[in-house]
Image (cartoon, rainbow, N blue to C red):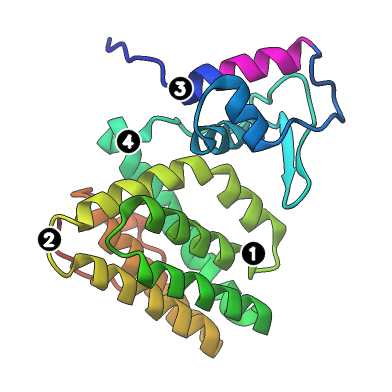
Amino acid sequence: MRTKAITLTEQVTQQLCAEIADGKYPVGARLPSGKQLAEHYGVSPAVIREVTEHLRSQGLVESRQGLGSTVRSRVGNAGFRVPQEIGIDRGELASIYELRLDLESAAAALAALRRTGQEVAQMQALLDRLGAQLHDPDRSTEADTAFHVAIAAATHNPYYLQLLQYLNLQLHQAVHAARLNTQRQAGLSEQVHQEHLAIFHAIRAGNAEQARTAAVSHLQGAAARLGLQLSARAIPPGSQESTHPAA
């Protein structure tokens, strides 16, 4: 069996989980701010964001924009889990993309039917930001992930958003891996941006089937650029499989 070095994120997650279990942060209490936690543990804000995603996925905390994170439980749930270190196993990464195909293509279709003008404007702003950061994998990953989350929010079905947030850490890792790959071949970053624009234009136009097809095409392309093999059975019904160059 392989042994892997424990990451900073895992170290801080374990410490914070232990402190919650010991009652240092009781149920209903608000955790210190991300900046305060980063200073306390001597890590970057990015590490604290990942730690928060771990805690949220375990049902230990609830996060609300502008209000921080509140402790919900002293013990994490033992329900559905996705392996956190998916980047080290191509089979697990392919499985994540198969899940995303179903989840995000359906979300894109619903978003096309239910999006508001404000949500369309938010997606446009995220794509504008993403377009300006195409060749910066770290910064573009944040905007890329936020764009997919914005689509889930536009479904107005809270479970799409909650599930995508639950998978947010894995999604972040997968998107970052894909972003790094696109830097290896000229024009790939622009191609990915055009795929995002195709999804956005279909959602803005209210065309559910076009939005679904564009989302499938984008995710197939992302998987292909990572050299992942997806089962043909993973392709949602009504979508046509497309061919993309691997990076």
108 or 13, which is in the foreground?
13
Label at residue 76: none
- Nearer the observer: mark 2 or 3; the answer is 3
Picture residue at 32% right of the left edge, 53% below the top: 137
Chain-order first, disc 1 or disc 2: 1
Q: Is residue 238 visible?
A: no
Type of amino acid under label 4: Gly
Placement of the N terminus among the 4 image quadrants: top left
Q: Are marks 4 and 1 in contact (CB under 8 Å)?
A: no
Q: CA distance from mark 4 to mark 2?
A: 21 Å
Residue at x 36% of width, y 46% of height: 174
Instruction: From the top left corner, tell me how far across and down residue 247 is, in percent.
Output: 15, 56
229 over 73 or under it: above or below: below
Q: From mark 4 to mark 3, how far is it between C-alphas?
A: 16 Å
Q: Give, as a three-letter code, the residue at label 2.
A: Gln
Q: Secondary structure at mark 1?
A: helix
Quarter of the image holding residue 52? top right
Determine which residue is flagged by label 2: 185
Q: Which residues are magenta?
A: 13-22
Nearer-N-terminus badge (2/3): 3
Single out the residue that lies furthest toward the front: 39
71 in magenta: no
User: As drawn, is 195 to the left or to the right of 45?
Assistant: left
Q: Which mark is residue 87?
A: 4
Q: Whole-percent x and y of residue 183? A: 19, 57
- The residue under label 1 is 153
Helix, strand or loop: magenta stretch: helix
Q: Which residue is mark 3?
A: 8
